[in-house]
Image (spheres, rainbow, N blue to C red):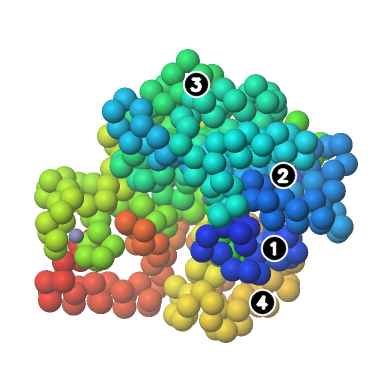
Amino acid sequence: MRIIADLHIHSKYARATSKALDLENLEKYARIKGVNLLGTGDFTHPKWIEEIKANLSEDGTGILKSKNSFPFVLQTEIALVYTQGGKGRRIHYLLYAPSLEVVKQINEFLLSKGRVDYDGRPIFGFSSIELVEKMHALSSEIEVIPAHAWTPWFGIFGSESGFDSLKECFQEKVKLIHSIETGMSSDPEMNWRISELDNITLTSNSDLHSFWPWRMGREANVFEMKELSYKNILAAIRERKGFTETIEVDPGYGKYHFDGHRNCKVSMSPAESGKVNKICPACRREMTIGVLNRVEQLADRKEGFTPAGAIPFKRLMPLSELIVALNGGTLYSKKNWAAYNPILEKFGNEFNALLNASEEELAKVADEKLAAAIIANREGKIEVKPGYDGVYGEPALGKVAEEKKEEIKVKQQKGLGEFF
Ligand SMILES: [Zn+2]
Ligand SMILES: [Zn+2]
């Protein structure tokens, strides 16, 4: 069976999420999106784990099921803030567990290190080395994965508080790391330029803070397995067994692709920011160095290299982003849903429409431009205006793209310091 898995999510108990982000809505929108395996998110949170226990049940496969048999993997995210090698480090990790019993042990350990009840993603002061050592001692089936590995502040390779290599971070415990999450602002191709990652499985998830279909599954892992079990998920992550491909947004869509300053509305490619010594022309302080630049710094290979055994990937923007780029309005607007719903009704879920529907079939429920955009999206042909310093990138399509270019030109002429 084919599994589209989004294995990094959050619950209503994480900061900056809505009260409606519960298991019921997660399942509902997963079915709409076409995601058929979700992480539970936030299993460290005392109230969320109670909801997990009340609504999902174990059946010996290591995958928990809702009453309608929707599958979830026990997953959480924690932040570690500590000093190593004289430098402050801030790194987010994903943890996966094979059972509620193991979750209990993880939570007991974390409680001995600090509080877990104020956020779905609690912060601790111990090191990455201690984390992997301790998790391995609790159960060899716990998987620890550096989350959104390249983001400037909380990624393991982040420009602001990360490391230059996995080896530097984990030292002799590096063998316990099998995977990194590439995050939205980098794609596998960028990661293939770092030879240290050749034996590391590149995973992709949404890191959703809301269940909307433009968040959930915007990045995902595609597995092909006979039986859905935690063991098979581990085999996919650790040995790439049954790991068919990842679904990726254009890395420009991520919030940290380019260098820049959000408040100064300054965005630059690494080449442009190199010319100004990374100094923001608006405020004269150093810009936030994005993922593209950071990859360039750490890469020991030229662009375009594909390592042996690399998992292929597809580039795919969420349907709602295409609709908004064509029609204007916001992702939350009635206009978006009015174009989205007929497509959903006809094709059952968004991924089916994005990946499989023919242009003729699409044209029955979508206008010509949208049908063409869905096909272009499938072929990886949607251009994106890159994100920077916490600002999402935007797909550039047709008329809307022209209007944006015009707007940018005007700003540049007025000397508002926006560079592209
Ligand atoms: Zn997260
Ligand atoms: Zn600035």
Which residue has dot 4 on it? 341
Nearer the observer, 116 or 196: 116
Using residue 289 as the reference point, say whether residue 135 is left or right of it. right
Q: What element carries label 2?
A: strand
Disc nearest the viewer among 3 and 1: 1
| Label 2: how many Cα within 10 Å (few below 14, some 14–19, many 20+) | many
Which residue has dot 1 on it? 22
Check disc 4 and give the amino acid type. Asn
Q: In this view, does 86 lie above or below 340?
A: above
Cα distance, mark 2 to mark 4? 29 Å
Which residue has dot 3 on it? 174
Circle 1/circle 4 CB separation < 8 Å: no
Which quadrant of the figure contains the C terminus? bottom left
Residue lying at 55% horizontally and 49% vertically, measured from the top left? 121
| Label 3: how many Cα within 10 Å (few below 14, some 14–19, many 20+) | some
Residue lying at 39% horizontally and 56% vertically, measured from the top left? 255
